[in-house]
Image: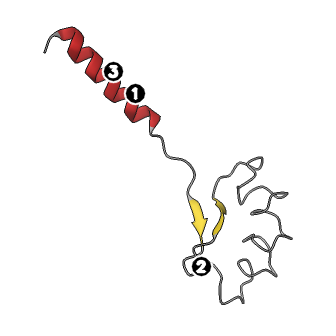
Amino acid sequence: MNKIGLTFVAGFLLGLALDTSAGSPVLVDKKTVKYLGNLSSNPYDPDSTSNPYGRYGSEYSQDSINNPYGQYGSPYSQDKCE
């Protein structure tokens, strides 16, 4: 393989490696496989558990781990995330 071809292949592989960056981890209930948001610290991400106004971060949402009276946020719930 010549030098130009080797440079092209190396650049292509580097581009693939940089393009497959990992996103935020997601939270899923093991029993029901229900999506409970992503664990991003971004308060503006609509799916983040850190968004106080979003479905998965609000303390009033039934799908939020931040709701102390909800299925997933209550310390007494049998379905809490472990």
**Going by the image, does 57 lie left or right of 14?**
right
**Residues at badges 1 and 3 in contact (C-beta under 8 Å)?**
yes
Q: Nearer the viewer, mark 2 or mark 3?
A: 2
Say whether disc 2 or disc 3 marks the residue closer to the N-terminus: 3
Real-space CA distance between mark 2 and mark 3, rounded to the nearest whole angstrom: 43 Å
Near mark 3 (Cα within 10 A), the count class, few <14, some 14-19 or many ≥20, is few
Asked if 52 appears above or below 22 in the picture, the reply is below
The mark closer to the camera, 2 or 1, is 2
Using the numbered discs, state the Cα–Cα distance from disc 1 to disc 3 in whole angstroms: 6 Å
Of labels 2 and 1, earlier in sequence is 1
Position of residue 60 measured from the top left corner of the image (x, y, whole percent): 86, 71
Looking at the image, residue 14 sits to the left or right of residue 23; the answer is left
Q: Tell me if residue 73 comes above or below residue 57 in the rendering.
A: below
Q: Is residue 48 above or below residue 62?
A: above
- Give the amino acid type for the residue marked by disc 2 in the picture: Thr
Q: Tell me how many marks there are.
A: 3
| Residue picked out by circle 3 | 11
Q: Position of residue 12 (x, y in %)?
A: 34, 24
Q: Residue at x 74, y 57 (%)?
A: 50
Asked if residue 41 is positioned above or below residue 59 in the image, the reply reads above
Determine whether the residue tagged by mark 1 lies in a helix, strand or loop: helix
Q: Which residue is mark 1?
A: 15
Question: Between marks 2 and 1, how big is the CA–CA gap?
Answer: 37 Å
Give the quarter of the figure containing the N terminus: top left
Mark number for residue 32? 2
Using a 10 Å C-alpha cutoff, classify the residue at mark 2 as few (fewer than 14 neighbours), some (14 to 19) or many (20 or more). Answer: few
Which residue does the image show at 19% across and 10% down from the upper left? Answer: 3
Residue located 76% across and 52% down the image: 46
Question: Of the residues shown, which amino acid type is indicated by label 1?
Answer: Gly
